[in-house]
Image (tube, rainbow, N blue to C red):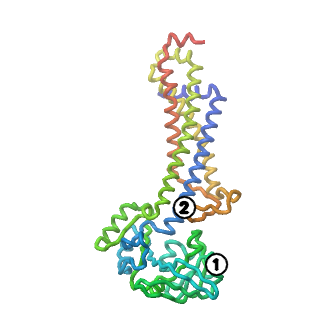
């Protein structure tokens, strides 16, 4: 076997130009593929962070009819005790409560409809980082003080700023007219078009007062621990609330469009890798087939001297493996360099568009990559596998040569 390996390495460089061209093409394709996978991973990770981890949460709990009807009276009672029980559940990292109400916000001379969301400022900041999205003023106080923060686009429509007063008028849960006066303490920018244009946040206790709710909320949003099994966590939380008519759903049931988008991303990555592997396979097939044709007489001689057909197959496959490994030694460092550039500097798309908008959310036009060692291993394993697969035909051709016929080939 060591002799076959030495022969394979020597044979690989007998036609240096062809070998170098094939290695260069495979290495370049490997590096570009690593860079493309990194940028796609980074992009979809950013989408997931924006729309799931810092928005809907990994798991949501509602009264069964609330998601379909969004009625203000479809609430979860005893929310404080329920929240404490869920927070004590292993695997749950954070829990935030929310109250929703459509209201008419009125300023001194203007008014506009808005979705007023009641939040616990400290818990919401740990989940959605709303405190880091304040562009003017400050976030809500930990205790209810009649404060409100407003989307920057909504503030422009209402012609208000930090320090202004807003009146909120809405229909309460009991059918009465709810109205409260709030002071604007901050303006936020979330990159969520709907929230920035028609969203406002108040303390959950202030929202409960406005809507005529007691210890009731519309939603509990959960963020699980890293690498937690979402399906298993849904089953666990469902067991905790089994005695109540509540609906427990994972993020992919809440945000179906995002689930479809991420599936499309997986399909795009599969197509990208398939193209790389097909091109690499064709290159390897051409190189090894030409190598076998050129060495027909030589292979006939070594076969006549006692080299068995299975050893000829191993010889050709060993040459192919060496070719793939050389391409790896060149392509992986080049790909890591491209990954590093994409991670630290990103791909600037401002020449194409000032903002990238998707699913109602705008993203930074500078797309950054994400490094995953598993992706590199998958790409390299796939490249080696497709190279060996492509070399089967040339290897079988070499094994089927009849020594008497092959030695007469010029």
Q: Is residue 113 above or below residue 317?
A: below
Select label 1 or label 2 by which is in front. Answer: 1
The disc, 1 or 2, on the residue closer to the chain's N-terminal end is 2
Look at mark 1 in the image and give the residue it sits on.
157
Taking 160 as reference, is 288 above or below it?
A: above
> Which is nearer the eye, 271 or 10?
271
Query: In terms of image quadrants, where is residue 71?
Result: bottom left
Residue 3 seen by the camera: no
Toward which corner of the image does residue 95 lie, by quadrant? bottom left
Element type at marker 1?
helix
The image position of residue 324, as x and y in percent, is 55, 36
Q: Position of residue 239 (x, y in %)?
A: 30, 68
Residue linked to disc 2 = 47
Residues tagged 1 and 2 counted as in contact (Cβ below 8 A): no
Q: Residue at x 47, y 82 (%)?
A: 204
Q: Position of residue 24 (x, y in %)?
A: 64, 37
Please rate how many residues cluster around mark 1, counting C-alpha atoms within 10 Å: few if below 14, some from 14 to 19, many from 20.
some
Instruction: Tell me the distance, in whole angstroms, between the alpha carbons under discs 1 and 2.
Output: 28 Å
Which of the numbered marks, if any, corresponds to residue 115?
none
Q: Residue at x 53, y 13 (%)?
A: 406
Which residue lies most toward the right here? 351
Looking at the rendered structure, the secondary structure element under dot 2 is helix
Q: Nearer the viewer, residue 45 or 90?
A: 45
Residue 134 percent coordinates (x, y) = 60, 77
């Amino acid at each position: 076997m060591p002799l076959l390996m030495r022969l394979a390495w020597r044979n690989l460089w007998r036609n240096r130009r062809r070998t170098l061209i094939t290695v260069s093409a495979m290495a370049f394709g490997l590096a570009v593929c690593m860079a493309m996978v990194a940028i796609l991973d980074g992009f979809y990770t950013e989408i997931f962070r924006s729309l799931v981890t810092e928005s809907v949460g990994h798991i949501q709990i509602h009264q069964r009819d609330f998601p379909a009807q969004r009625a203000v009276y479809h609430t979860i009672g005893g929310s404080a005790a329920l929240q404490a029980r869920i927070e004590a559940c292993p695997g749950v990292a954070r829990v935030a409560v929310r109250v929703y109400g459509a209201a008419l916000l009125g300023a001194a001379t203007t008014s506009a409809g808005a979705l007023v969301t009641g939040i616990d400022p400290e818990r919401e900041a740990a989940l959605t980082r709303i405190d880091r999205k304040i562009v003017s003023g400050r976030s809500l106080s930990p205790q209810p003080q009649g404060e409100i923060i407003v989307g920057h686009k909504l503030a422009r429509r209402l012609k208000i700023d930090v320090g202004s007063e807003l009146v909120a008028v809405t229909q309460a849960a009991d059918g009465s007219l709810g109205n409260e006066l709030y002071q604007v303490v901050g303006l936020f920018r979330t990159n969520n078009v709907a929230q920035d244009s028609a969203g406002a946040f108040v303390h959950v206790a202030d929202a409960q007062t406005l809507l005529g709710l007691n210890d009731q909320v519309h939603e509990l949003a959960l963020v699980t621990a890293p690498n937690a099994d979402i399906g298993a966590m849904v089953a666990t939380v469902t067991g905790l609330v089994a005695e109540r008519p509540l609906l427990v759903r994972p993020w992919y049931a809440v945000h179906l469009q995002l689930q479809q988008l991420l599936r499309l991303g997986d399909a795009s990555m599969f197509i990208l890798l398939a193209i790389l592997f097909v091109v690499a396979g064709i290159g390897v097939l051409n190189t090894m087939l030409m190598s076998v044709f050129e060495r027909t007489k030589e292979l006939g001689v070594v076969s006549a001297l006692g080299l068995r057909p299975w050893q000829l197959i191993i010889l050709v496959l060993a040459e192919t493996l060496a070719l793939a490994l050389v391409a790896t030694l060149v392509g992986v460092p080049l790909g890591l360099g491209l990954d590093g550039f994409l991670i630290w500097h990103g791909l600037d798309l401002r020449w194409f568009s000032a903002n990238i908008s998707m699913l109602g959310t705008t993203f930074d036009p500078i797309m950054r990559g994400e490094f995953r060692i598993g992706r590199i291993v998958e790409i390299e394993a796939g490249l080696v596998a497709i190279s060996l697969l492509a070399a089967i035909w040339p290897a079988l051709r070499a094994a089927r040569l009849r020594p008497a016929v092959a030695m007469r080939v010029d």
